[in-house]
Amino acid sequence: MGNSLQIATHKLGPRDITDCLDLWVDRMADGYQDPFLLRNCAAYTPGYCGRIAEHTGTFTGFAAGHIGTLASELSIPYNWVADQVNLDSTATIAYADIACVKPVFEHRGIGTELLRELTTQLYKHDGVDVIVAEVWEHTAPTAARILEAHDYEQQYYSDTYWEYATQVGHEPCPACGSTPCDCAGSLYTHDRRH
Ligand SMILES: [Zn+2]
């Protein structure tokens, strides 16, 4: 861990979309981005939330999430995790889609700050008591550390977590090189009722 850096944060707006997409491609390879999510965040569509981090005016990273229902947001079938999550398939939840930090600004507390703000903002939506995050093995050491620092709990792990969601219409995974993706993954939840 390096020293933490002076950062300023603000809502993701229309002028941030290109920076976010470029960083997302850089971190995950082309074809794994969600421009629809970023556009809705930037338009302040109800149910969407995006945060930007800057250091002395320079874009350093972003996080984004949205409101949905549990079964429709999961990349795996709801029944695989029904017992672990202890929520109805139709429960309203917040989904923490993505947090990315520029490589040169990594390990300076920016991802931690972005997740803290995203968590706070997502809970401002009525009826949301649980935030769901799915972690790709490729980013797991950093992502898991940051999630666990904010009391997100690992509920489920599979060594082929993404296989189900990437059968059709996906480019080969940038980490494992396969379609469907052969990578491991985990489901994390944050439950503010605990
Ligand atoms: Zn993969």
Image (spheres, rainbow, N blue to C red):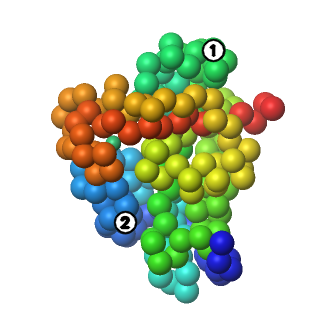
Residue 32, position in %: x, y?
Answer: 30, 48
Left/right placement of residue 127 relative to residue 49 reads right
Front residue of 108 and 44: 108
Res. 130 in view: yes
- The quadrant in which residue 109 appears is bottom right
Number of numbered tags placed on the structure image = 2
Q: Is residue 159 above or below residue 5?
A: above
At label 1, the amino acid type is Asp
Q: Secondary structure at mark 1?
A: helix
Residue plotted at (48% across, 29% down): 158
Callout 1 crowding tier (Cα within 10 Å): few <14, some 14–19, many ≥20: few
**Disc 2, disc 1: CB below 8 Å?**
no
Which residue reaches farthest bottom?
Answer: 56
| Quarter of the image that includes the C terminus | top right
Q: What residue is pinned by disc 2?
A: 23
- The quadrant in which residue 93 appears is top right
Front residue of 174 and 46: 174
Residue plotted at (56% across, 53% down): 141
Which residue reaches farthest right?
Answer: 194
Split into quadrants, the picture shows ligand 1 in the one at top left
Q: What residue is pinned by disc 1?
A: 83
Residue plotted at (49% across, 74% down): 60
